[in-house]
Image (cartoon, grey):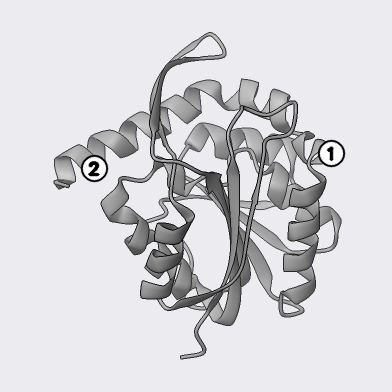
Amino acid sequence: MGDHVRHHSHHSVRRSYDTVAEEYADRLHNELDGKPLDRALLASLLEQTEPGTAIADLGCGPGHVAAWLAEKGARTVGIDLSAGMVETGRRRFPQVEYREGDLLGLPAGDGEFGSAVAFYTIIHLDPGDVRRAFKEAARVLRPSGLLLLAFHVGEEVRHLDEWWGYDVDVDFRFLDPARVSALLEAAGFTVEMRMERTHYAHEAETRRAYLLARRGRA
């Protein structure tokens, strides 16, 4: 994957999310209310996060997941490629600290976070970049820190030119949980939990996977 192609892919994802930021936040700001399994996993992550450390929300969008964690007492930092999403999030969820940035070069210090969540963010990465993103997640986590991932299961790539009436250019890559697990292990994580579920009635009709992985101590 050449840097030129990667740059185009990044640019189109960023621009697409900038375009839908307000609509996305309007539609999804309460989405966890209808996702009991997601809430349970987030609560489990929170319970296992070292007290006093921050939780990163990687690819946070408007930050509704980070805001839910903040309501439960966590210090949260939302990181997103889209300036539009970050701007929308700062207005709606001021309890979250936001940073504009890239999964392949996170704007965070080594070992800054006690744990991290990445819901439906690696689905926008080029396949060759997923391991690099996991290495970067490991860098910003404390030793033994946890990473909670969610993604769509499968092999297809869904391309959107139109999203809620807006013109966009974005790919959603469905992923194989076994391959994602192998990439996590290669990046120095140990996968502790793997769960799959069908979609809730109000969600897109996809099968979803969740992985909870622990960074090595070294």
- Viewer-proximal residue among 39 and 103: 39
Dot 2 alpha-carbon crowd within 10 angstroms: few under 14, some 14 to 19, many 20 or more: some
Q: Is residue 106 visible?
A: no
Q: What number is the disc on residue 6? A: 2
Q: Is residue 132 above or below residue 118?
A: below
Q: Which residue is mark 1?
A: 33
| SS type, badge 2 | helix
Give the alpha-carbon distance from disc 1 to disc 2, as whole Å: 35 Å
Q: Is residue 71 left or right of residue 147?
A: right
| Residue 77 percent coordinates (x, y) | 63, 58
Closer to the N terminus: mark 1 or mark 2? 2
| Residue 119 percent coordinates (x, y) | 59, 48
Q: Residue furthest top?
A: 165
Q: Is residue 136 left or right of residue 5?
A: right
| Residue 32 percent coordinates (x, y) | 78, 41
Amino acid identity at mark 1:
Asp
Residue at screen point 24% across, 42% down: 6
Q: Is residue 209 above or below residue 44?
A: above
Q: Nearer the viewer, mark 1 or mark 2?
A: 1
Amino acid identity at mark 2:
Arg
| SS type, badge 1 | helix
Dot 1 alpha-carbon crowd within 10 angstroms: few under 14, some 14 to 19, many 20 or more: few
- Viewer-proximal residue among 93 and 209: 209
